Amino acid sequence: MYTQTENKIFGNYYLGRLASPGEMKSGQDPLYDGASGFKVNIKILSHVPDRIETELNRLGNVVKALDTRLRSGYKYANSEYRNSSKQEKRKQLYQDFSKSIVIFKLEYNDGYYNVINPVFTTKDKDFLPEQEFDTIPYFKVSDVNQFIDLLKSGAKITELREYIDNTRFDALMFEDSFIPPYIILQESEEKVFAYGPLNDINNGESPVSYSFSFSDEANKIIIEDDDFLYSNYSNVESNEENLEKLTCFFIEKHASNPIRETLRKNEKKLSDEKKKDEILLNNKIQEKTNNHLEKVQGEAEQIEQKILYNFKMIAESHGLFYTDEDLYNFHTSMKTGNLVILAGMSGTGKSKIVNCYAEALGLADRGNYKKIPVRPFWQDDSDLLGYLDVLNNIYRPGDSGLIDFLIKANKDENKDQLHIVCFDEMNLARVEHYFSQFLSVLEEVSEDQRRITLYNKDYQNRLYNSREYSDTVKIADNVLFVGTVNLDESTYHFSDKVLDRANVIHLKLRKFKEVAESAKKSNVADSIGSAAFTKTQFFGTRPSSIEENKFLLQDSELDFLWDVHELLQSANNQLGIGFRIVRQIDHYLQCLPSNNELTREKAIDLQILQRVLTKIRGGEDQLSFILGVYDGNSNQVKDSSLVRLFDQYSEISNFDDSRLKILNLAKELQVYGHTI
């Protein structure tokens, strides 16, 4: 409802006739004598804008008009109408409305809607009282297609006036949320078009700055009826004499609805054709993309095989004859981007194998490989990173050289160069102490969050070397971390904080006879090549689903991991498989090389060994029902709940290495009363 108390003239045009007695909500005569003259009740036959639709519907779409406002001659004191008797006036008014209908605007005044600016126009011979009309804007143009282009471009009404003959087009007709279904465009006597559908009117600061918002599939149709404009009412008395002011036509619904329907059908047809074209185009683009991806993927797989070949050849040239499975496992773990720890007894070549990997990637020759011997006295990260010398206002980096290495890796010119940091004998000091910041930030996805703090930011502007050493150092995604550890009385065990974030790989010793035979067959004289592989090449086969955090583990694999988690929790609520480990196992499986040297089944076994079983520590009372009881006679484990789970999920893996690990843990329980 319009609630303003001041006078308000609405810009829309309306078509009406004299209301019938049955349409009067008050029960009054449609034409009655009031205190200031005859009141005439007019029934609106055309569209009512949304803003006032509810209120006018309540009134039955009937509005009032003073007789003296209906015709200009009626208001003058010396006119024949004003000097007539009431009976003669009533008769005159009935005659007016029996032959004519009225086009008008509305005025809102003190809660009433009144007719203003009325124009009588002769009724069509086929006029029926129950007819309804659409109010359709009209434009007389010289070039329809040019005008449509202007409409599509969002031209304002003030800009459109230059291209229309009805230059005094009344833009106020679009006030109060009035949106006609289409518009009429006339190019000549023979060429009259409907253009639509019209979706909205874009309101500006004033009506002349309004613009039209048509459907993306708006279309024009020619109106075949030569008398179309002549057989419908307009807002002016004579279309030809008042062309400048011609603004709209009132199109009877039976004639307007087919136009609406045709425009909508054409819109749907054009939309469907557009969708088909888009689908065809998308299919072509997808086909090209797939072809490109296959080519890129093929190239990436070739590069990865070259890396693995180099790795094996270089390792053998240094007398390291590991199984392909171990080499592939190490490479895949590195490719996931998480911390990798090589564990095992002293003298098995853990440090050398990292050197060989860096050499295979071409990093050593470019200074992109940093090996840091860990020192037993390291207590916190200042021993590794350096410290702030407050007395001399200088930051002193650690003698490990790590900070300078990270700064170099983060330079723009080095962003696509791969870098590896190796902490040799990593557990000579407590990793949780000197490596604490790294453990927290390495799992962050965003590079902006992968930052190590060197000193308090408040000192930034006081230091002489603050330009060289900012208060934080970013760990770019082109830096990989690996550590080697010995497990003996001289070293520290890892906490769960470390094990949760690392692939702990125990390199297997091959039988000495096998190694000797492999050494004889190995032809290390073959050219290996010295090209350095970039970060892009190294990660070329790592799927984008890892960055998108998509889970690709199969349901049976997820069920298995959950059952293992619940079993471990039943022994100790500090044991289990956290979400971080599940996600990293998923990433590892997604990064497997494509040549199936390391199968998914074997990879699952290795991940259980490297990510889950490494955390099982405790006493016999806690773990015996999980690990089972070691039988020395048969060299087997009996009554192991974990082994039963392996049997239950044998379709996803044989769990050979995991079974062997459980056997060794059960032995430790029997011998020491706890796992080591």
Image (tube, grey):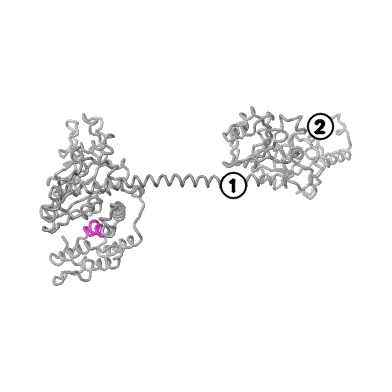
Q: Where is residue 673 drawn, in percent x and y?
A: 15, 65
Q: Return the residue found at the far top.
A: 162
The boundaries of the magenta stretch are 605-614
Q: Where is residue 195 drawn, in percent x and y?
A: 64, 39
Quarter occupied by residue 581: bottom left
For residue 433, side relative to residue 118 (left or right): left
Residue beneath disc 1: 269
Q: Amino acid at mark 2?
A: Lys
Q: Which mark is residue 75?
A: 2
Q: Which mark is residue 27?
A: none
* Residue 92 lies within the magenta run: no
Per the picture, the main secondary structure of the magenta-coloured stretch is helix
Q: Amino acid at mark 1?
A: Lys
Q: Where is residue 369 drawn, in percent x and y?
A: 19, 41
Quarter occupied by residue 405: top left
Q: Residues within 10 Å of mark 2 (few under 14, many from 20)?
A: some
Quarter of the image with the C terminus in it: bottom left
For residue 257, side relative to residue 354 (left or right): right
* Vertical relation: 671 (above or below) 430: below
Q: Where is residue 313 drawn, in percent x and y?
A: 18, 48
For residue 310, side relative to residue 183 (left or right): left
**Residue 628 visible to the viewer:** yes
Q: Residues within 10 Å of mark 1 (few under 14, many from 20)?
A: few
Mark nearer the viewer, 1 or 2 = 1
Mark 2: secondary structure? helix
The answer to which of 640 and 454 lies nearer the viewer is 640
How far is the residue under mark 1 from the one under mark 2? 55 Å
